[in-house]
Amino acid sequence: MSVLEDLLRDTTAGDPIHGVKWTRKTVRRLSRELRRRGLKVSRMSVDRLLRKRGYALRVNRKRKTKGHDPRRDRQMHYIARLRQTFKKAGFPVVSVDAKKRELVGDFRNAGRTWRRKPIEVLATDFRRDAEGVAIPYGIYDLARNEGYVTIGTAHETPAFAVAALRRWWKRAGQPTYGLRRTG
């Protein structure tokens, strides 16, 4: 135990108030380092020893907040009023969001579909095997309940966002309900 504690000393962090501890070292790495020091120990044994010391495999939990800011509330109410004003005037109200990069090619996708045979895809998801990278940028028109997606191939940048909105505006976004077009 003293050798294990010595290995954990510089890589253990924690919260002294709540008694929570964690380490950046994996069980595999710890068992390898213990074997280098002459101790025959398996990964399972290291796992058991860590659990005895109060360690456990954990994931971060999103529970904390930074507190309530009254200015944020005012801002959200202001945006909601603007949204209603624009909708009543017949202007589009949009929500925009870029999604994570997707590799283009013969890759496995999450989810299932009903089919007679599975689709054969590459065993690995290496970027070098991709035909390219696609960045989906979605624009959702709340008033019309319609969505529009632009696919980019470079980087998610402000210029890409503006170009996606411009393309949406020219193809689908211009108001045709309740307004006269000019020019």
Image: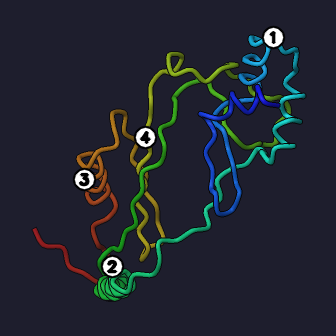
Return the residue nearer the eye: 69 or 32: 32
Q: Report the Cα–Cα distance between label 1 and label 4.
A: 51 Å
Residue 71, image x, y percentages: 33, 84
Instruction: Say left or right for 175 vs 34.
Output: left
Q: Amino acid at mark 3?
A: Val
Which numbered tag is attached to residue 135? 4
Q: Amino acid at mark 1?
A: Gly
Which numbered tag is attached to residue 162? 3
Circle 3/circle 1 CB separation < 8 Å: no
Return the residue nearer the eye: 114 or 43: 43
Residue 126, image x, y percentages: 56, 20
Which numbered tag is attached to residue 177? 2
Q: Which residue is mark 1?
A: 38
Q: Quadrant of the C terminus?
A: bottom left
Eye-nearest disc, 1 or 4: 1
Q: Which badge, 4 or 3, is on the more N-terminal residue?
A: 4
